[in-house]
Image (cartoon, helix red, strand yellow):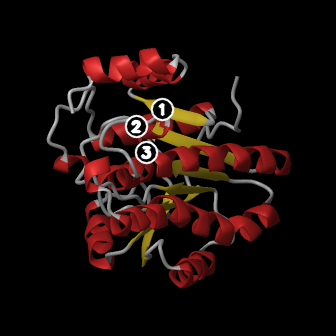
Amino acid sequence: MSLNQPITNFEHLNVWIIGASSGIGKASASWFADQGANLILSARRLENLEELKSSIPLKSQSQYIHSTALDVTSTEQVSQALSQVLSIWNKIDLILFVSGIYTPVRADNFDMGITSKMIDTNLMGPMRVVSAVMPQFLKQGFGHIALVGSVAGYSGLPKSLVYGPTKAALLNFAESLYYDLKPKGINVHIICPGFVETPATAINDFQMPALISAEQAAKEIGAGLQRGDFEIHFPKKFSYFLKFLRILPYPIYFWLLKTFVKI
């Protein structure tokens, strides 16, 4: 059963990707362009976006890609970027929010500077964007809001003392957002990847189970949107295992972590 309206055809849809300069966002830009979507790409570094834009082939002469700089920790920049988007488009079919940062944190290196930065980017960032675009989506009465979280948000994991809680909160936010917006014709998706080859995961000094490429992640996201999934999680053999851990009694949960997670 689809909780959202499936997107059966991306051709000529207006897709705004926030966090498009690297990793999953960059791969998703190529995937959506290949499907024929019109794109606006956002990230902090405009030069990276321009380089990406020039590397993506278009499927037709009517298709186009624009870019606009955006730091999601700035309410002013979010407002400015949205104004630019709406000066180009009179509707937004899909927002894909990918922006996020990851720093491994454990109790013995708990730092409030790192903590504040991750919360501001990973949680307050998508909230700023959703708050800003809400009037436009309510005016339209349709569209899709897709937020990239993480399987780290399912339960407490080693080295995720801060990152995990930001993603758990984002999952909760998406659930509440879905409940409020579904009756108004607006679709909400939460995307929970496992380990994906990105600049963020490149800093990990441990073996990452079920590691996939950013291109594979982009395909999984696209397929989930085509199915109309509320939660798009992958790779399944890893994400279902973490979902299973989530429902276990705590003595078993912590024993399994200690036994099998060598971090």
Which residue corresponds to the image point at 23% horizontal and 32% vertical from the top-left? 208
Can residue 147 be seen here? The reply is yes
Residue type at mark 2 is Lys
Which residue corresponds to the image point at 66% horizontal and 72% vertical from the top-left? 132
| Spot occupied by residue 89 in the image (x, y as percentages of width and height) | 62, 72
Q: CA distance from mark 1 to mark 2?
A: 12 Å
Image height of 43 relative to 162, above or below? below
Q: Foreground: 258 or 122? A: 258
Could you tell which of marks 1 and 3 lies nearer the N-terminus? Answer: 3
Q: Nearer the viewer, mark 2 or mark 3?
A: 3
Badge 2 element: helix
> Please, which residue is most extreme toward the right here?
183
| Spot occupied by residue 16 in the image (x, y as percentages of width and height) | 52, 62
Which residue corresponds to the image point at 50% horizontal and 57% vertical from the top-left? 97
Quarter the N terminus occupies:
top right
Badge 1 element: strand
Q: CA distance from mark 1 to mark 3?
A: 15 Å
Apparent side of residue 239 relative to residue 175 in the rendered image (left or right): left
Characterize the local packing of mark 2: few (<14), some (14-19) or many (20 or more) Cα atoms within 10 angstroms.
Answer: some
Which residue corresponds to mark 1? Answer: 233
Which disc number belongs to residue 164?
Answer: 3
Residue type at mark 3 is Gly
Characterize the local packing of mark 1: few (<14), some (14-19) or many (20 or more) Cα atoms within 10 angstroms.
Answer: many
Image height of 41 relative to 196, above or below? below
Apparent side of residue 245 relative to residue 50 in the rendered image (left or right): right
Which residue corresponds to mark 2? Answer: 219
